[in-house]
Image (cartoon, rainbow, N blue to C red):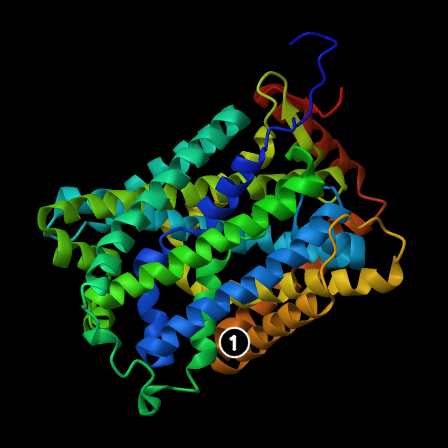
């Protein structure tokens, strides 16, 4: 490390890397496992395809709103930064607090568990995989992702590109034979696709909830804006290209599923892609769980790469311990911000009921994304002179934020207990803000303790503040 060399996060995210971060994080285990949730709640094959396309368009609206936010506010940190700019430090702290103590660890744990289950499935076939083996494989996968993100930004991005291509290959392996059979006249499962008597209007909002979840991840490039080459051009382009790729992949994959499987078979399956492969490919179906596991690994990698930058920015804004905004002196990675989630995620993995925690959190996630997009509309009026290299028509953020709030109210109605617990968890952010941030005169012993912990961690992790 030469004295004149700057210690900073470098601009290493090109257009291709940006597309691979978004596409590679959105396409996780969802499309291989979850189409049955949408079919079940929509009630018919035709209606489920309409929901997939509509969720894609709504997600594109959200993504375009974030493209405007990302090009006008060129700071990393995603939702946190935009809420901070629009509504001030208290609301931003609550968002970051909930993310840190619950949303992100639970989300990472769920993707990691899917990775652990699928990577072991070919070894234990046709028996079930023991729970302890899944937990061990999950821990190894999680540790590998943490290590990779701590070591090198370039290698993290290269592996993300490789994993994104392997996901698209998996999807092609599903789409091509499915569409081939469709053109050969295999259309019996599409007859009466829009049977009116099977459509459940009451279930449609829940189908949308599942669909929006499958598309979630379009906002991840906004977490690393400061590391993007030429963000005014790259951010909107990467977001639009990624969303088009994902929408086409999702819709065509579902068409392929329905060509090979009837609605009843799809609803009876635990892992749709594996059932599809068994029906069409015989012995080759063993490879599908491995591809799904790689897909989950890519989602973990992209998610951690992006989220660590939010903690980095929150620390720089003085809302998290100073050490989290420090950078490794040789590797130029935000090492403390990368590893901060590791202990909480492992704790949740071995002790918590992850799926109920995700239920608490899913509504909070949409609530805060809705708040960030409302912030865009709010800043159009309060800061009209702000440079906006990329500007969307006002109806796009308006429609998207209304959808977010609709989903939030729906979860209050459909699952009041879990939603209430999630709300209570988020309210713990208020006393935390006043104790850790707002209170200027902290006791001397507290100040001494935090300084010595910061110094010790700085020495152990070999990190220094940026730009020194």
Work out whether residue 33 can be spotted: yes
In this picture, is 177 found above or below 52? above
Return the residue found at the far bottom. Answer: 197
Nearer the observer, 174 or 327: 174
Quarter of the rendering containing residue 76: top right
The residue positioned 52% from the left and 42% from the top of the image is 19
Return the residue found at the far front. Answer: 184
x, y (%) of residue 177?
21, 54
Quarter of the rendering containing residue 315: top right
The residue positioned 73% from the left and 8% from the top of the image is 3
x, y (%) of residue 77?
67, 45
Label 1 packing within 10 angstroms: few (<14), some (14-19), many (20+): many
Q: Mark 1 points at which residue?
A: 411
- Left-right relation of 380 to 353: right
Work out whether residue 340 can be spotted: no
- Left-right relation of 330 to 435: left
x, y (%) of residue 344?
49, 45
Quarter of the image where the C terminus is located? top right
Nearer the observer, 17 or 206: 17
Quarter of the rendering containing residue 333: top right
């Amino acid at each position: 490390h030469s004295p004149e060399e700057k210690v900073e996060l470098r601009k290493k995210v090109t257009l291709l890397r940006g597309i691979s971060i978004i596409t590679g994080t959105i396409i996780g285990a969802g499309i291989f496992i979850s189409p049955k949730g949408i079919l079940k709640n929509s009630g018919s094959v035709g209606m489920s395809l309409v929901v997939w396309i509509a969720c894609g368009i709504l997600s594109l609206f959200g993504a375009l709103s974030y493209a405007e936010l990302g090009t006008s506010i060129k700071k990393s940190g995603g939702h946190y930064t935009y809420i901070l700019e629009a509504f001030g430090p208290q609301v931003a702290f609550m968002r970051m607090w909930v993310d840190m103590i619950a949303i992100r660890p639970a989300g990472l744990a769920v993707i990691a568990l899917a990775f652990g289950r699928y990577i072991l499935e070919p070894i234990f076939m046709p028996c079930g995989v023991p729970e302890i083996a899944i937990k061990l494989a999950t821990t190894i996968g999680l540790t590998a992702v943490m290590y990779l993100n701590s070591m090198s930004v370039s290698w993290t991005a290269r592996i993300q590109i490789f994993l994104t291509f392997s996901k698209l290959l998996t999807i092609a392996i599903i789409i091509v034979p499915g569409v081939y059979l469709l053109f050969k006249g295999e259309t019996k499962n599409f007859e009466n696709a829009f049977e009116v008597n099977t459509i459940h209007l009451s279930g449609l909002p829940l189908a949308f909830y599942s669909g929006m979840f499958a598309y979630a991840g379009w906002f991840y490039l906004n977490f690393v804006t400061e590391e993007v080459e030429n963000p005014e051009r790259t951010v909107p382009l990467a977001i639009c290209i990624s969303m088009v790729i994902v929408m086409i992949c999702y819709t065509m994959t579902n068409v392929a599923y329905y060509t090979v499987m009837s609605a009843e078979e799809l609803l009876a399956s635990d892992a749709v892609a594996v059932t599809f492969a068994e029906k069409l490919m015989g012995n080759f179906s063993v490879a599908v769980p491995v591809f799904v596991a790689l897909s989950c690994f890519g989602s973990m990698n992209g998610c951690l790469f992006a989220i660590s930058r939010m903690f980095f920015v929150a620390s720089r804004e003085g809302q998290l311990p100073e050490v989290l905004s420090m950078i490794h002196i040789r590797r130029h990675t935000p090492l403390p911000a990368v590893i901060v989630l590791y202990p909480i995620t492992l704790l949740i993995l071995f002790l918590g009921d992850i799926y109920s925690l995700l239920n608490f959190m899913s509504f909070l996630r949409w609530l805060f994304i809705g708040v960030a997009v409302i912030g865009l509309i709010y800043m159009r009026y309060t800061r009209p002179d702000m440079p906006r290299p990329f500007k969307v028509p006002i109806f796009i953020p308006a429609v998207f934020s209304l959808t977010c709030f609709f989903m939030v109210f729906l979860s209050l109605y459909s699952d009041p207990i879990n939603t209430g617990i999630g709300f209570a968890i988020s309210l713990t952010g208020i006393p935390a803000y006043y104790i850790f941030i707002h209170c200027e005169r902290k006791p001397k012993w507290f100040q001494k303790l935090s300084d010595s912990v910061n110094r010790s961690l700085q020495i152990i992790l070999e990190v220094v503040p940026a730009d020194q």
